[in-house]
Image: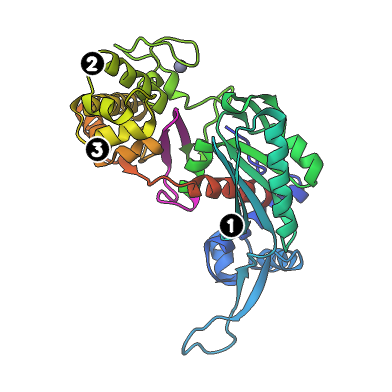
Amino acid sequence: MLKSNLDQKATPKFLKKHNEALLLREIYAHEAVSRVQLAKLTKLSKPSVTELTQGLIEKGLIFEIGPEDVPDKVGKKPTLIALNADAYQMICVVIHNTTIVVSLLDLRVQVIEVEKVPLNGSTGNDLVDLLARAIKRMVDKATRPILGISLGSPGIIDTLNGVIHLTANFGWHNLPLAQILTDQFQVPVYIGNDTNFAAMGEYRFGIAQGVGALLVVEVGEGIGVGILDDGRIIHGSTYAAGELGHTPFPFLDDVCICGQCGCLETLVSWWGLKRHAEVLLKQQHAVLLRQIVGDGPVTSDAIRTAFEAGDPDIIALVDKAANYLGRALVIVINLLNPYYVVLTGSLLTFGDRFIDTVRTTVHDHTLPYITSRTQIVAEPLDDKSIMYGAGAFLLERELGL
Ligand SMILES: [Zn+2]
């Protein structure tokens, strides 16, 4: 688990920073709040609140918005304080397999500018250059000081040191991306696994706000699992927590991209489904799929079209994938007993039948007591949760929010 900036020795300077963060969190959580309310909420003394809020006003992070509108109140009305969402701007980047999405946000994660940049097959250092140029364009558009840059990327990522350990698709191996970008832009830079950031985004600003134990499971090109416990990302000893896709399952015996045999991803991923569909075609099955692809290669779209057109062999294949995903979730749910499992990713485009099969499988194989508070929800595919998570991470690290 990543240590927060607050896990430090309690020197007087640190104590002040800690108490400032306490106040700022409450101010962030409210549209407007008085100093008296802040003292009650934080249990800090009223003189401390007065002194600390003055410091935050001088830093430009908060401002006084006027007296509280309390009808019939006799005497002086308390002055309300609010966050200055424009004190800084943040640059949040979501790196996909085919595009980079760079957003400029205010401190309330409202999007000010956004740019989508196609990768056009760039990998390695070329991709780093492409990324840096896209960030530079957004830095030039910023109208306020930049709090920092936060990036969500696929792969195994050492978030503490800002190093991408491995993102095979991009040819990135032990890449100190945070340092490279810090040197160039002279602001704090953070990098996290995209699914971890998605979990953080759902926790801070999405459908699972404040939920103690939360999983985000993304199924598409592979399987990614983001795990949050009380708002903290579970990274694991080598930042590889959540690599559920490379767990061997019974009756799967294909060789996986990781080199092992029988991984879940050899069935529950687009590449796994394509491989299985090709075997069906060789066996003269999946007649509708054959009509769709002719003599060409099997594509994700062709599989989805055959599924929607009612090809019984493709329907059985997708059902099997949903069933295996459900069984994998049973293991995770039994281990972590989460409140929420958020399913996301492009395999959800198979629709309700896929999601219902996952839910039914989980239901049929777990003790009712264990799942009595667990909701499995499906999120339509978008990258907002990753962007929100990147923003939330930056806010937490830089402002203690
Ligand atoms: Zn594998």
Q: Please identify, in this view, whether the residue under mark 1 or under mark 2 is nearer the observer.
A: 2
Q: Secondary structure at mark 3?
A: helix
Crowding at dot 1, Cα within 10 Å, few <14 / some 14-19 / many 20+, comes out as some
Q: Secondary structure at mark 2?
A: loop
Classify mark 2 as within 8 Å of ligand 1 or not, answering yes or no.
Answer: no
The answer to which of 120 and 240 lies nearer the viewer is 120
| Residue beneath the point at 72% across and 30% down | 125
Q: Please identify, in this view, whether the residue under mark 1 or under mark 3 is nearer the observer.
A: 3
Residue 35 x %, y %: 61, 70
Residue 162 x %, y %: 68, 33
Amino acid on which disc 3 is placed: Glu
The answer to which of 44 and 177 lies nearer the viewer is 177
Write down the region rendered in magenta. Answer: 204-227
Q: Earlier in the sequence, mark 1 or mark 3?
A: 1
Crowding at dot 3, Cα within 10 Å, few <14 / some 14-19 / many 20+, comes out as few
Q: Is 166 placed left or right of 223 in the picture?
A: right
| Residue beneath the point at 51% across and 44% down | 200
For disc 1, the marked residue is 25
| Residue beneath the point at 60% across and 69% down | 82
Q: Earlier in the sequence, mark 1 or mark 2?
A: 1
Q: Is residue 14 visible?
A: yes
Circles 1 and 2 in contact, beta carbons < 8 Å:
no
Is residue 198 shown above or below 262? Answer: below
For disc 2, the marked residue is 284
Q: Is 213 within the magenta?
A: yes
For disc 3, the marked residue is 308
